[in-house]
Each structure stands twice: as C-alpha cells, then as structure tokens.
Image (cartoon, rainbow, N blue to C red):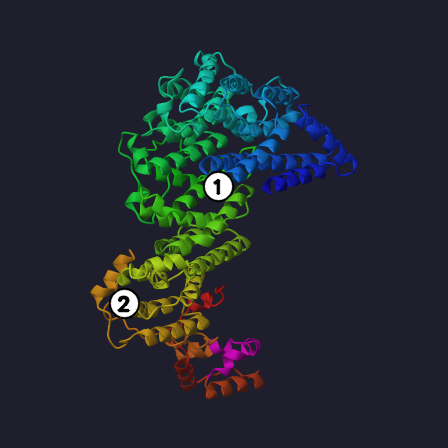
Amino acid sequence: MKGGIHRQVYGAFRAKLSIAGPDHQSYNYIFDNMIYKKTVSVGALTPVATAALRQDLSHLSKYLKFLTRGQQAKGSDAAMTMGTEAAVYAAEASDKNDILERVLPASVSEYVELVKAHIIAGPNHRFASRQLLLLGSMLDFSDSTNRKVAGEFVKELLHMPIDHELDDGGNEVVIGDGINLLGDKDWANAVSGLTMKVHAASGEFEEVVLGVLEELARPCRERTADCTQWMHCLAVTGLLLVNTKSFRWMHGKAIEPAEILQSLLLPGAKHAHLDVQRAATRCLGLFGLLERKPSEELVKQLRLSFIKGPSPISIMACKALLDIGMWHGPQEVDKTMKQDLSSQLRDHTVAFCPVNLCDTKEDFNIELLDLLCAGFERHDWGESVEADENESVQAVLGEGFAKILLLSESYPSVPASSHPLLLAKLISLYFCSENKELRRLKQCLSVFFEHYPSLSLNHKKCLSKAFVPVMHTMWPGINGNAAGSTVMVSNLRKRAVQASRFMLQMMQAPLYANVSENLDGTVDPSLDFESGEEGLAIRIAAEMAGFHTKKTTAEKSYLSVLSRILVLLHFRSSEQGAIKLLRRLLNRVAESVLAEKELLKELKQMADRLKALDRHPDQELLPDQANLILERLQLDLDFPVEESTEMPPTPAPRSTRPNRARRRVRRDEEISSDEEISPASVASTNPTVMSTRSQRASKTAAMTKMTASKSIRINDEAEEDVEEEGSEVTSEDDSDASDQSL
C-alpha cells in the first residue's frame, strides 16, 4: 500500500513537469536531460522556468532524502522482525529502493560524469551542479571501487580554484564572498557533505582535506602565491575547521594544526590584500574554537584586527572574538594576554567610560568585554561590507551581546554586573536614528525584547538597573549630551520618551507560565522588590531627588518625564519596606516638578495609594531599614530622619503681577511702578488666573478695566488675600518650567 503511495507521489511530481506552455515544456525537456545524464543550463531558461526548476530540484532532493531514510529504516525493521511483518517492511523498502534506482544514476561513475558535465558547462549550471552534489549523499559508497572513484572526484572539487575576473586596471577581482569554496557558502556545504559521505571513517575526512591543503599551502608558505591562491587555500582551511570536531584527528597528518596557524593564518591576517586578511581572520576565529585554550598570538592578532583593521576586517574579528569569548569564557581569553588588564565593567556596575579606539597610540590593556563595548562608541568604522550592506561592527556586537543576555545562564563567565550596561547599549541602539546598517539588528532586537523580560526575574532586575542609564544616555542637554537645534532636541526627547515607555512595558510584562511555576517558593521575598516595579520606582525617585534646586530647562523636562513614568508603576502590598521608603521619597519627587499641577495631582494620588497599601501608615521607616533597601539597589542617597511623608499642597496658578517682596521697597516706588502698567496689559491677563483670585481682588481687577484712564491701585489687604490663595512653593523659576512638560 505504502509503496503504491510513493509511486503516486513520484508520478504526480513527474506529471507536474509536463504542464503545457512554452516555459514548462522547455523546463520539462531540460529536467529530463538532467535526470538522464545531460547538462542543464539554468541560464538558458526564462525567469519563470528558472524559478520552477530551482524549486522543484529542491523538492526532489528533499523527497529523495526522505525515500533514502525510509528505505534504510524499513530495511532495518525487516531485519529485526519475523513473519508477515518482516515481509511488509521488506516490500516497503524494496518499493522505495526501486524509485531511487529510477531517478539516481546507475553507478557512482555515471554520477561523477554527470556532475562533471554540469561543472564544465560553466557558472550558469552551478545551481544544478550543487543539487547533484547534494543528491550524492544518497548514493552507496561502501564498495571500495565506488569510494575510490568518488574520492578522486572529491579531490578535484577541493582543487577547483576560486572564480575571478580582471577589472579595467588589470587587477584580479574575486567572484563571490571570498571566504568559501568558489565564493559560495552553499557550494562549500555541498562539497563538504559529499566529502564526509565518501570518507565517513573517523579521521579520514581530515586526512584527505589536509592532504589537499598541504599542496595548496606550499606557494603560500614560500610567499610565491598570489591573492587568489591565498584565498583558495584559506577557503579549504575554513572548510576543514568548520567540519572537524577536534584537533586530535589532525595530528600526524600532512600538515599539523600549529603549522596551519603559524604559516597560513597569522601571515594571512597580515597580508596586504584585504580579502586575504578577511578570510584569514575568519579562520583564526574557527581555529580558536577548536583549541583547548586560545593561544596568545591568535588572541593578540584578533584584537589588533578589531581595533586597527578596516571595516570588513573589524567585522570578522569582532565575530571571532565574540565566538571565542562565549566558547572559552572572557576570563580565559584575557588570561592568554599574560598581563594585567583593567576593566571598568568589572570594577563598576553601571558607570562606564569607553576607551577611544580611534587613538592608535593608546595601549589597549583592557579586558575583552571592555574592548568590545568600546566598539559601540566608535562611529568611524567606515563603510559596511559590500556583500552585506546590513552588516556593521555595531550590528555584530548587538547580536552577540543580545545572545549573551538572553542565554545569560549559559554564560556564567560573563560577569552579571556587566548585564545592565550591555542591555542599556542595546536599548540605545534600538532607538537610535535610522541607519540601514542597523535594520537587521533592530529586527533581531525586536524579537529579543519580546522574550527577554519574561524569561527570568534576573532579567527584570537587569532592566530595572538599566532604566536610568538609558535615560542619561538618550536625553539631550543632561549628562554631557549635546542639545542642538530646537527640532533636533524635540526629536531626541520624543525618542527618549518612547524608550522610557518601552522599558516600562517590559518591566510590566508577565513572566512565562513555566518560569512562574519554577519560581514558586524559591525566591527570597526580601529580594523580590529588586526585580519588580517597586525597585524601579525607588530608582527613579532617587534619581529625581538627586537633582539640585536650580535646574536647567533640559533637567526640568527630564524630571517631568521620569515622574510620568513613576506614577504608572504599581506596588504590591507584600513589599512594605519599599512602600514606606517611596512614601518618604515622594516628597522630594514633588519638589522637582512643582510647576506641573497635573503631575503633582497624580503624585498625590500615588501617595494616597501607597498609604492605603501601608499596613502601618503611622509607623516610620527606620533609617537602617531604608539604607538596607538602598544598598541592595546600589543607590547612594542621603536619608534624613526628619523628612515627612506628607505631600506638599498642589500650588494654585501663579499671579501675573510682580512678587510682593519686589514691590515693598518704598511706597512711592510702588505707586510709580503701578502707574506704569497699561490697561492693555491688564486686559490681556489670563481669565482663568483671574477667576481663581479672591473675590475682592477679582472685583478690583474688574474695576480697573472699566476705569482705564485712572491709575491702577491695589491695596495691601488685597495683596495678602491673593498670596494666601497662592501656593507657598511657587517661585520665580516656575515661570520657566510651566511650558516644559511633554
């Protein structure tokens, strides 16, 4: 039954190739020619037929692999069973084997001739050639004769030179990516897959490839090779390093691993041709992954290439350093330098002053993570790689650090104190200005941020620590950030506000169900506030309380945004210590935004909510308890004992007249200054402000409008009534802050 189904599937597949129409007729003819050992020119087809050929060849390859695995599985089942069941399994295996024999060449020799015919036909036949190489993994190479024929063919594939052409100046230009066989990663994978199928015994694959590599390396070691020979040799080296499992299979062969490093990889990384440098740098990274401990020369060369190399070289060195650092651990990589290295990430929790990588005279005796973090701050890496315009050093760093943070439990060697800084860098990159080189990174980060806060409480704790540093970095006019024009400042502020709301959303995202189940009863309740919204609220309040009384316009708008985030945070009744502490800090927070009436009202409402959650509202928080909470949050803040938990009253709208202290110098001066006020200025007074005055002052103002020809006089008693209506906390500076809220 099942064999009949397979015949139907294959028949339907073949029937699809006979659809009427000029494109499909030519496609059917060419496909049949390929199956029956004739060359197929993809370039001779129309675009429709070319797309159909590529798709159906891929489907055929997958289907044949399915048949091969099924035939092997059913054959094994038939051998392990008896009776009728064994006969059924044997019949199914036979049916699948018959279909394979109808499609695949009759012998390995015929298969090799078919592939060679397509390769000789030129680059237009490259796709069909690669599909035929993939089909070779389904052939049987157990016979020594077949294995010998296929082995010679594999060596020919490894010896195939990289395609190149001459430019107008007579220089050789490599076709493809310049780091894989024939400049094509898919082709290299197909060749390596066939080679490993033919030479499946342990160590046999390495022996064959090293034999070819030794021949290709001779002109490179003798320094007589041109750039294409160097790149061909490095491409074969990369194929070997990607597919081998250990150096122990390479010892005692035609060329030793140490010789590969000293005579090929290190000299190639210093070659004058940039493509050779790039290929050698990639191989250095692969070589370092196979070492038990990374060698000193390898690490030094990668660090040098990352710092001083052009953009393509720096990108490849960056990838290599990230891979080696995650595989061996940053500390193990730093030990290879055999000198004392400084680290701001290790010594400081969040504060970080990156080194200047542009200073070629500087001695960069810093640890690996510090060196990579400094790459975020450098903006003169040059143009991105032509082969991938979406690739840049910052994008590579972003993807690497995102992986470290997302799988932080798998990388315990990366210090946890560096996580908030790395996360802050990623958030800043995510909200940076439009850059085509960061588009792919932003797509990756959008997925990263969707899952990161819901995977672990430690992730939320890290996010809470990163909130204030992100705002410091993004808000214009504070912390040494440039301001610029009004339009630029407005755009920067909008971007920072978006980032703050985005971080708030991540903090309030629930944990995944399986994570919550694993955490039940395992989390210390006294430390839970560090990863919750309570910890973030205290951090924001402490940040606002640390500003001086006199504030710039940028600082006032910054504090306004922080307070708007603060009032959106929620507290749990179980966090009594955090509730009492924030009640004490809200008084200082309110003093930072006295000019914002609506904000003060929201802060007062928040204070009322906290008071309702406080189980003992009359009981004061002891200084030792407050300092303990601040210490766990790594905050440095003075905590006065006498500070009240009562919120200041909401200020009334300010009067448009001069302050009383300025008018009471002399009676004569007051009269003269009042006479200078014109009726027009009184008429333009905000009616909303006038309506909040005392009844007596309002009548006086109305009378002055009707008697514009007379001088305006307001007696001292009316002044006192107005001032009693106003807030005690209004000041002259508030006039500048009234229009700063966003």
Residue 178 magenta-drawn? Answer: no
Residue at the image position 63 percent from the left and 30 percent from the top: 103
For label 2, the residue is 577
The magenta-colored residue range is 673-693
Considering only vertical position in the picture, is 358 above or below 348? above
Q: What's the residue type where badge 2 is placed?
A: Gly
For the stretch drawn in magenta, what is the main secondary structure?
helix
In the rendered structure, which amino acid carries the disc numbered 1? Ala
* Residue name at image x 36 percent, y 50 percent: 420
Task: Name the residue nearer the viewer: 124 or 166.
Answer: 124
Badge 1 marks a residue whose secondary structure is: helix
- Residue in front for this viewpoint, 374 or 274: 274
Question: Residue 569 has which mark?
Answer: none
- Image x and y of residue 630, in percent: 27, 60
Mark 2 surroundings within 10 Å by alpha-carbon count, few (fewer than 14), some (14 through 19), many (20 or more): some
Question: In which quadrant will I find the N terminus?
Answer: top right
On residue 395, the disc is 1
Foreground of the two, 248 or 659: 248
Residue 38 in percent (x, y) is at: 68, 23
Q: 537 left or right of 340? A: right
Going from N to C along the chain, the mark reached first, 1 or 2, is 1
**Which corner quadrant of the image does residue 42 belong to?**
top right
Q: Is residue 152 left or right of residue 544?
A: right
Residue 146 in percent (x, y) is at 53, 19
Q: Residue furthest front?
A: 83
